[in-house]
Image (cartoon, rainbow, N blue to C red):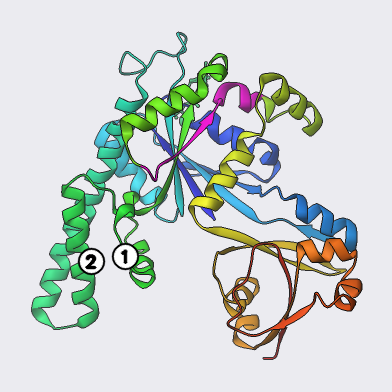
């Protein structure tokens, strides 16, 4: 999974990025215009399985965060530069400035989260409109030369997108089939991506957090928009502390979870993701899939050979496995099942794929 961080200048994007990725800085790499860091998805269940199997290797699921560096540009130019950098992102974190900091004057002269959110959102729509218009034009030309049902279908989808964008509606709100959504992803439209708002507050606003978030949500009036409070300034400092100190610090502040935990939970929910596990002496590993994936599709996430040569899956659930204490005991208790290609994988399934290629 790949998450891009966007927001107006000085909204706290880089601090939010650091909050979400600091603990992982050794794996960081920066190149060109953006910085990318890969973060392990914290999952207590993986630790429990690792204690049970004592494998040589424990591999968590990962998320890649990107902080695009679009320096010295604002408005339409900023969004145009953002487009190619965000093409591959599965989701966007839209950082909105809700903190007041006299040392960092707001470029617009005042702090107004609703105004800022609307401004960048409409610029995203405008950038998408440009992409859609260019594509429609090209497709119309092609369609005059030859009749192609695939192209005609794409044309039809783009016309729908065009209409939505003109009405200031983001593409992610349109109702496309799964197949169409796959095709849509190829267009790289910013407003088609799942979006989380990182509502960047000052730490002395913790007590009024829910009130501020509620006000923001009421003004934006988009029931599907997930708004996650984050305290960029203080949380990026906490993220540098050792885990136990960080926990104590968060508790002192009255925050229940780290910023990373909040964002990962929300992203999993928003993107409809879940995890399954593979476990053995060599490796215990978490894998991320879309909810509803069949056993064969899940096998393909591990390796394409496993999907191609899929015979069956031996499945138990994490809860049953840990209740039994070991795989052998889970089998004796009748908790290990054989499932076929079509079995819908559930969050927390522990699977062994039998295959033959
Ligand atoms: N008080 C306070 N200051 C913050 C907070 N978040 C960010 N800042 C400050 O605001 C300034 C800008 O933060 P950055 O994270 O660099 O913002 P950015 O969006 O990455 O900025 P550009 O990349 O330049 O567009 C920094 O000086 C931060 O210390 C916050 O939650 N509270
Ligand atoms: Mg920055």
Vertical order, 90 against 80 (above or below) = below
Give the quarter of the figure containing the N terminus. Answer: bottom right
Q: Residues within 10 Å of mark 2 (few under 14, many from 20)?
A: some
Q: Quadrant of residue 284?
A: bottom right
Q: Residues within 10 Å of mark 1 (few under 14, many from 20)?
A: some
Cβ of mark 2 under 8 A from ligand 1 = no
**Residue matched to label 2:** 157
Residue 296 lies left or right of residue 67; in this view the side is: right
Q: Is residue 235 magenta?
A: yes
Residue 242 lies left or right of residue 179; in this view the side is: right
Residue 104 lies left or right of residue 50; in this view the side is: left
The segment highlighted magenta reads: 223-237
Residue at the spot x=65%, y=81% of the render?
306
Residue 317 lies left or right of residue 205; in this view the side is: right
Q: Which of the two labelled residues, at mark 2 and mark 1, occupies the earlier sequence position?
A: 2
Vertical order, 13 against 273 (above or below) = above
SS label for mark 2: helix
Residues at circles 2 and 1 in contact by the CB criterion of under 8 Å:
yes
Can you tell which of label 2 and label 1 is closer to the viewer? 1
Residue at the spot x=70%, y=29% of the render?
240
- Where does residue 297 sit, x and y in percent of width and height? 57, 76
Farthest residue toward the front? 333
Give the quarter of the figure containing the C terminus. Answer: bottom right
- Between 250 and 162, which is closer to the camera in this rendering? 250
Q: Is residue 50 magenta?
A: no
Check residue 253 in the rendering and tell me which mark sits there, or answer none.
none
SS label for mark 1: loop
Mark pair 2, 1: CA separation: 9 Å
Cβ of mark 1 under 8 A from ligand 1 = no
**Residue matched to label 1:** 176
């Amino acid at each position: 999974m790949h998450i891009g961080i966007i927001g107006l200048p000085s909204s706290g994007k880089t601090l939010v990025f650091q909050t979400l990725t600091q603990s992982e800085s050794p794996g960081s790499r920066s190149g060109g215009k953006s910085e990318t860091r890969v973060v392990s998805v914290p999952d207590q269940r993986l630790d429990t399985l690792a204690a049970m199997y004592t494998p040589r290797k424990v591999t968590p699921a990962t998320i890649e965060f990107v902080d695009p560096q679009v320096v010295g540009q604002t408005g339409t130019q900023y969004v145009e530069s953002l487009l190619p950098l965000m093409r591959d992102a599965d989701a966007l974190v839209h950082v909105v400035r809700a903190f007041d900091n006299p040392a960092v004057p707001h470029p617009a002269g005042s702090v107004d989260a609703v105004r800022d959110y609307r401004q960048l959102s409409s610029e995203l729509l405008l950038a998408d409109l440009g992409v859609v218009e260019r594509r429609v034009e090209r497709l119309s030309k092609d369609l005059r030369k030859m009749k192609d049902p695939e192209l005609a279908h794409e044309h039809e989808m783009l016309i729908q997108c065009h209409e939505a964008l003109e009405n200031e509606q983001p593409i992610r709100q349109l109702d496309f089939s799964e197949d169409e959504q796959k095709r849509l992803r190829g267009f790289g439209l910013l407003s088609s991506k799942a979006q989380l708002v990182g509502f960047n507050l000052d730490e002395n606003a913790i007590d009024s957090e829910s009130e501020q978030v509620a006000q923001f949500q009421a003004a934006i009036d988009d029931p599907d928009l997930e708004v996650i409070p984050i305290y960029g300034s203080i949380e990026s400092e906490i993220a540098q502390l050792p885990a136990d100190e960080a926990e104590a610090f968060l508790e002192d502040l009255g925050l229940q979870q780290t910023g990373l935990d909040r964002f990962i939970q929300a992203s999993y929910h928003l993107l409809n993701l879940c995890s399954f596990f593979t476990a053995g002496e060599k490796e215990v590993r978490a894998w991320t899939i879309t909810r509803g994936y069949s056993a064969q599709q899940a096998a393909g996430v591990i390796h394409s050979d496993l999907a191609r040569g899929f015979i069956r899956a031996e499945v138990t659930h994490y809860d049953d496995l840990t209740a039994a204490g070991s795989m052998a005991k889970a089998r004796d208790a009748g908790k290990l099942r054989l499932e076929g290609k079509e079995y819908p994988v559930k969050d927390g399934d522990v699977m062994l794929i039998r295959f033959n290629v």
